[in-house]
Image (cartoon, rainbow, N blue to C red):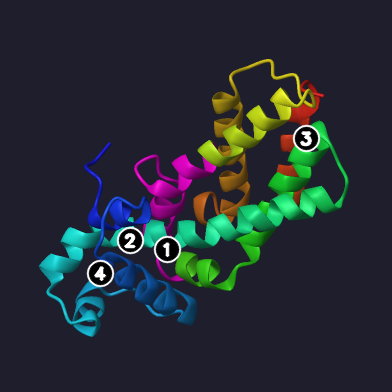
Amino acid sequence: MATATQLERHLSGHAQRRGPLDALDEGRRRFLRGDRLDMGDLAADLGISRATLYRWVGDRERLLGEILWSFAQRGLAESRAHADGRRLAGADWVVAYVAHNMRLTASFEPIKRFMEREPDAALRVLTSKHGVQQSRLIDALRAVLEEKGAAGELALPIDPADLAYAIVRISESFIWREFITGEEPDLDKAVQVVRLLLAGCA
């Protein structure tokens, strides 16, 4: 794993200055507006050099990863509330949680614009093992699976980290299928596959 950037240290509470968080906040605003994230323009607007900006946040794709993760965290919280609201348990709860999060991601206009404008960069940021998004999604889902297992709602036949990895990769492949294989996305099919994966865990 690469050395933590200043932004990552600030997000974890291990730094005092707030400069990198200003970069994150301004980057989020630009992303939501649909602007292409230009590091030179961002540095100029923050009143710092490009070198300082890169020292704070790493490269452009690492900053984009943090921007996208900030939205993903909200989506995961909303997906948990959605599954809880349906009064489900066990595998059915996990399917509802994953399905809702997939639909939120696929319908989020800023991400769709990013994917359409910069498909190669977007796929790297969203689905690469080298980015923050995929690994954190896997960790979040692993924690959910472990939580449900500890509550006696799931019998996990394999390592929850492996199951979480499989579910996240399936979700990615169906959400962004248009940009991976040229086929239309099919979230209903993705939900069916996730349900089949979890059928043995009930």
User: What residue is shown at x 58% (from left), y 33% (from top)?
Assistant: 142
The residue wearing badge 3 is 195
Query: For mark 2, does the 10 Å Cα neighbourhood hold few (<14), some (14 to 19), or many (20 or more) residues?
Result: many
**Distance between the alpha carbons at the discs numbered 4 and 3:** 44 Å
Q: Nearer the viewer, mark 4 or mark 2?
A: 4
- The image quadrant of residue 176 is bottom right
Q: Earlier in the sequence, mark 4 or mark 2?
A: 4
Q: Earlier in the sequence, mark 3 or mark 1?
A: 1
Residue 4 in the figure: left or right of residue 91: left
Q: Earlier in the sequence, mark 1 or mark 4?
A: 4
Residue 169 percent location from the top left of the image: 55, 39
The residue wearing badge 1 is 67
Nearer-the-camera pick, 197 or 176: 197
**Distance between the alpha carbons at the discs numbered 4 and 2:** 13 Å
Cβ atoms under marks 1 and 2 closer than 8 Å: yes
The secondary structure type at the circle numbered 2 is: helix
**142 above or below 123?**
above
Nearer-the-camera pick, 145 or 36: 145
What amino acid is labelled 2 in the image? Leu
What amino acid is labelled 4 in the image? Gly
The mark found on residue 19 in the picture is 4
What residue span does the magenta drawing correspond to? 117-138
